[in-house]
Amino acid sequence: MHETDFLVRSEPINQQNKHKASHFLGLIFLVLGVIMVLGFVWTAINVGFMATSLLDGRDRLMEAKGAVENLNFDQAKKSLSLAEGDFSDAGKYLKRVGWLKVLPWLGPQVNATQVLFDSSANLFAIVNQVADLGSDVLRLVGTTSDSTGQLTNLPPLKYDEMSPETKRLVLQRINGASPDLVLAAEQARLVKEEIDNLNDVPGPAGLVVKKLDSLLSESYDALQLAATASRIIPAFTGLEKEKVFLLLLENNSEMRPAGGFIGTYGILRIQDGEIKELEFNDSYLIDSAANPDVLVEPPAPLKNYLSATKWYFRDSNWSPDFTVSARNAISMFTNEVLSIPPEIRTNIQEPLSFDGVIAFTPNLAADFLKIIGPITIDGQTFSSENILDTLEYQAEKGFQENGIPYEQRKDIITALFNEMKTKVFDLPLADWGPLAQAVSNNLNHKQIVLFSNSSSESEEVIAKAGWGGLVSVGENDFLMVADANLASLKTDPKVDRTISYSIKKSDDGRFVGKTIVHYQHNGIFDWKTTRYRTYTRIYVPLGSELVSSSAAADVGQELGATVFGSFISIEPSESGDLVFEYYLPAKIQAEIEAENYSLLVNKQIGSANHSLTLNLDFGKKVIGATPSENQLEWGDKVYRVETILDTDKDFGVWF
């Protein structure tokens, strides 16, 4: 007799266990799969939120920057607060997905987000400081923001409509904020250095990095300008005491060592930011009036190549170091004024002491006219494109055609600059950003140089900022080329220059430097252009020994440097070279042998942005340099760089 379940075939116990195990494992894998999918979705959501928060924070920061530029500081703070919230959210999401740092594509973004989050406190502090200062200044000028953040009481936002007392209070507040501005600039620099290391980050984080890097570059430059300017406010704005400045309008179409020929000078009187006097005059008038009593012997090149018998005020900027030339200008101007008989001194501006000297080239006026637009004086329109040629024509020929006496031929310059001043001061302060940038660019490119004669502290600030036109030789290798146009009319804009510097080890083991200045004359003979005649000096490390030169060379010492000087004349459509070859001094030899070489190349005040080529053969493999060579040049014993000498340039090479 069969059992009731005899038709059911029983499996072996071990087989049943296998089935149970496989079902269990399948369930585990299913659960793990669900967890992984959920984890992936959760991670993706958090990464997405993190990216969105970063991008939103970036946009809020840009809104805050725009609000600051428009002087809407309340709105800037609101945007900043939102940006802080966005970056805080990004930080929360970052903690949830920190493990992604190990992955190849997402890892750099997570790391970048961490850096951005860590740096955000300093970034927000910078914007907050600027907004607080801006709000204080607006309160001083009587401008406030209503509950919607919109500016009210707008008229005082024009500088010319501010009272003298208000200008004084504003200048005091900005001057008092100089320590905060210096700190903010330093914070911007540190944050920028951190951000610079993230330039190759992909994805959304990379987009934020690029935008913030640009923002920080602009902010750092602006803060550096503001920090430096705020510290010299008392010396250059006449805060609480009138200041008198000698202005040198240096024509860089006729280059001289410290900027350009001083055909025109000016007197500026200023107190509490209020310009009391701004007048320009012809340098020849004071030189001619003082001529009988000028007894100073001119520098030898002026005697030899310009047939000068006396050293006049108009030639006072013979030193390429502006501190030297500025002191010479003050001394020579006051001595000439004192030598003029009182009965004929009535037409001569006659301050006998100056608080400083400000020299600038027509580049500054051209940049301002780009912003404020053309200006018409006596039927003659001046624009950024024609200001140099038009002023030159009016001073050389136009005054005769218009029946203007020779003594009044440069009165148009006073009229032009006073009209420019009027247009600038009539602009809303919110529109002054481009003007400040133009001033900054001209200072950095040595088209404006400053000298304080009454404040050693301000002079130190100016020197540190690079606004003083100093020739800083230092202890390392050094090069400066200084041209002096001698009887070449206004030919400089037609002459292209290339400066080349090379180093090579000689057979006797000494390193030889070689500087070549190549001139290409692209002009023709006309009323303002002729053959180019220049006495050129090169400044090199003290102790350098001249080996050879392409022309007879003067050798001397000046400004803590060895100086070689030669004269060259170049016809239109032709070219020419000045070549100086010299042994470098022992200290530079030792520096190279210590496998750590530095070079500073100074730009001449007022000069165009000449080409600069370096070809430095140290006889040792170059392992690093700043700035870096082109990658194709890596791996040999020569450091090769081609650049533009638009500012002073530092180079470093390691072997």
Image (tube, rainbow, N blue to C red):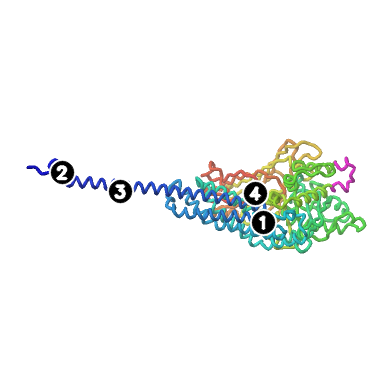
Q: What residue type is labelled 4?
A: Tyr
- Looking at the image, which residue is at 85% across and 48% down? 411
Count the marks: how many? 4
Viewer-side label of 2, 4: 2
**Amino acid at dot 3:** Ile
Proximity of marks 2 and 4: CB atoms separated by less than 8 Å: no
**Badge 4 density bin: few <14, some 14–19, many ≥20, Cα 10 Å:** some
**Relative to 306, 11 lies left or right:** left
Q: Within 10 angstroms of label 2, few (less than 14), some, or many (20 or more) residues?
A: few
Disc 1 is placed on an element classified as loop
Residue 459 visible, this orientation: no
Q: Mark 2 points at which residue?
A: 10
Mark 1–mark 3 CB contact (< 8 Å)? no
Q: Going by the picture, which residue comes out furthest to the right?
A: 343
Q: What's drawn in magenta, residue-wise?
A: 398-411
Residue position marked by numbered label 4 in the rendering: 582
Residue linked to disc 1 = 146
Find the distance from the CA under tag 4 to the CA under tag 1.
Answer: 69 Å
If you read the primary sequence from the N terminus, does the residue marked by circle 2 or circle 3 appear first? Answer: 2
- Is 200 on the left or on the right of 137, as rendered? left
Q: How far apart are marks 1 and 3 (CA)?
A: 63 Å
Residue 93 location, x and y as percent?
47, 53
Q: Mark 3 points at which residue?
A: 28
Label 4 vs label 1, nearer the camera: 1
| Distance in Å between CA atoms under marks 2 and 4 | 106 Å
Residue 42 percent across, percent down from the top left: 42, 49
Magenta span contains residue 625: no
**Three-letter residue code for mark 2:** Ser
Q: In which quarter of the image is the N terminus?
A: top left
Q: Position of residue 631 (x, y in %)?
A: 53, 43
